[in-house]
Amino acid sequence: MANYSTNEFKAGLKVMLDGDPCTIVENEFVKPGKGQAFNRVRLRNLKTGRIWERTFKSGESLVGADVVEVDMEFLYHDGEHWHFMKTDGSFEQVEADASVVGDTSQWLKEQEVYTVTLWDDLPIAVEPPNFIELDVTETDPGIRGDTATGGTKPATLSTGAVVKVPLFIDIGDKLRVDTRSGEYVSRAK
Amino acid sequence: MIAERPPANSSATDDWRPSAEIDRLRQRAGHLAAVRQFFQSRGILEVDTPVLGACTVTEPAIDSLRLHQREAWLQTSPEYHLKRLLAAGMPDMVRIGPVFRADEQGRLHNPEFTMIEWYRRDWTLAALMAETAALVDALLGPGPYQHIRYRTLFAAAFDLDPAQAPLSQLQQAAGSLLAAPADPTSLTRRELTDLLFSQACAQWAAAHPGERLFIEAFPADQAALARLDTDPDGVAVALRFELLVDGLEIANGYDELRDAAEMAARMSRDRALREAAGKAVPASDQRLLAAMQAGLPPCVGVALGFDRLLMLALGASRISEVLPFAQDRA
């Protein structure tokens, strides 16, 4: 991979730092008028999602990271690994373990398309779509017609996720959920 | 106010547009006129100095842009030319115009910017600081000023004396910063000091919102073109100040070094540092040295970044917001 100098750092650039692939979030040039120039850089570790702050002497460089984000369809879970397939017609598959899938496991529905981050062709992160439609598998019986009181109750969805839903929701209803906040949006038609 | 088109983001089709909003440029013109009025009312002559010079500074951490076709440099400040004018008998004067610094680009930096630099003969550094504050007040309105010594500011942040602390302690302090360098031991003493000083300034600014700070008595190895003195503790210090407003470095002033031999020695030291760092090594400016041999009158001088002062006056968060065309659109 190519080397990138501090003056090429910009948001979105993928680089290696301490052995982990990172994406640059912010790059601030810092220099006292007569003094040494530095770049204060915020990076997101793509494996852990953590934000790192690091200072580099201007002109220093980092090795680029071979990181791509690809759309992949979730196929199945074999008990240990989650299997995904590229949607570009290549039918290429990858498998990811719990350390990679993390909290996204509660949103994994077969045949749904996810954003999988590949580093040197191996998955390091799986992101769900912002909105997803899932069936309710478990909840207290719905209170018919109660659309106004604003009360909520927990409901378990087909993927295992538990969300707060309005009282009128029943088992078997299909719901639209925001995966970023884990919040119920509406009943899907 | 007539609604103007806002500056577009830097998409390929729209990057012919100015970096700053048209209304900001109107305000820029007004403030620039106020600056000229300030100097005129004080009887300070405005002079022009070359943008392109045969020589340039040898400062270790200021890189000049060089012409391809012949040995000529875009000037990083008008200082050398102004001093030659002083030596030739010019009275107090100011130069307002563009200066250039290679590779300085960021939220607060543009490789080309407008510097206001002026000199006062037979003045004290204290009087020049007061006049610098008056100019800042003219653009920003009056504000509270504080004075602090470089050493005191540094010690307040890190409990270290920048001149005396062992290298390992400076490395340790740098390593504990939130945005620590990857390897503090790879930095020289001077680089570590610069990094920690930036942090100390930021901490002070955060703790004293709205206050303006003159930092005085710089370490002797950061004298640049300032005279040296001995402080009450017997430590050699540079008669140099910087002004920070809202944590932003606005101005840098000196009680000017007049000793040509000392100047030549500092240039040699700077050139050796640049050589060791693998940087371009400009020749020492013999015309400046000759002028100093002929006799530079006792004087103080200060350089102030107009664009940054304008940022503060207009509440801009990026220098590009006050420039007609920042580097990425120039």
Image (cartoon, coloured by chain):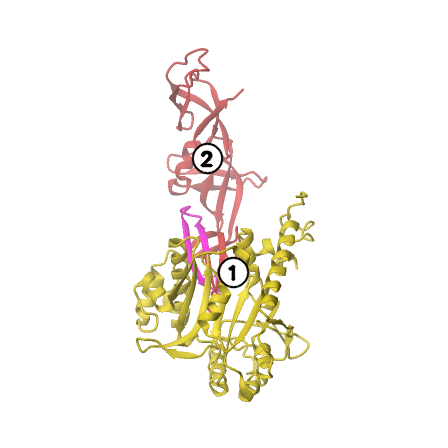
Chain colours: A red, B yellow
Q: What residue type is labelled 2?
A: Arg
Q: Is residue A83 above or below residue A136?
A: below
Residue B3 vs residue B187, the one in the foreground: B3
Quarter of the image where one finds residue B80: bottom right
Name the magenta segment's main secondary structure: strand
Q: Which residue is most to the top? A: A144
Q: How crowded is mark 1: few (under 14 residues within 10 Å), some or many (20 or more)?
A: many
Q: Where in the figure is residue B165, as x and y percent of width and height?
A: 31, 71
Give the amino acid at mark 1. Val
Measuring 42% from the left and 28% from the top, which residue is drawn there?
Answer: A159
Report the disc number at residue A180. Answer: 2
User: How many angstroms separate mark 1 from mark 2 (CA)?
Assistant: 47 Å
Q: Quadrant of the C terminus of chain B?
A: bottom right
Quarter placement of the N terminus of chain B: top right
Pointer 2 local density, CA inside 10 Å: few below 14, some 14–19, many at least 20: few
Res A4 visible: no
Q: Where is residue B44 in the image (x, y as percent from the top left)?
A: 59, 71
Res B69 seen here: yes
Subunit ID for the residue under disc 1: B
Q: Nearer the viewer, residue A90 or B153?
A: B153
**Residue in the picture at 40% in, 38% down:** A81
Q: Quadrant of residue A16?
A: bottom left
Tags 1 and 2 both on a single chain: no
Is residue B11 shown left or right of residue B240?
A: right
Q: Is residue B164 above or below residue A127?
A: below
The region drawn magenta spans A41-63
Q: Which of B281 and A51 is in front in this view?
A: B281
Does residue B22 show up magenta in the picture? Answer: no
Which residue position is annotated with label 1?
A: B136
Q: Is mark 1 on a helix, strand or loop?
A: helix
Circles 1, 2 touching at the beta carbon (< 8 Å)? no
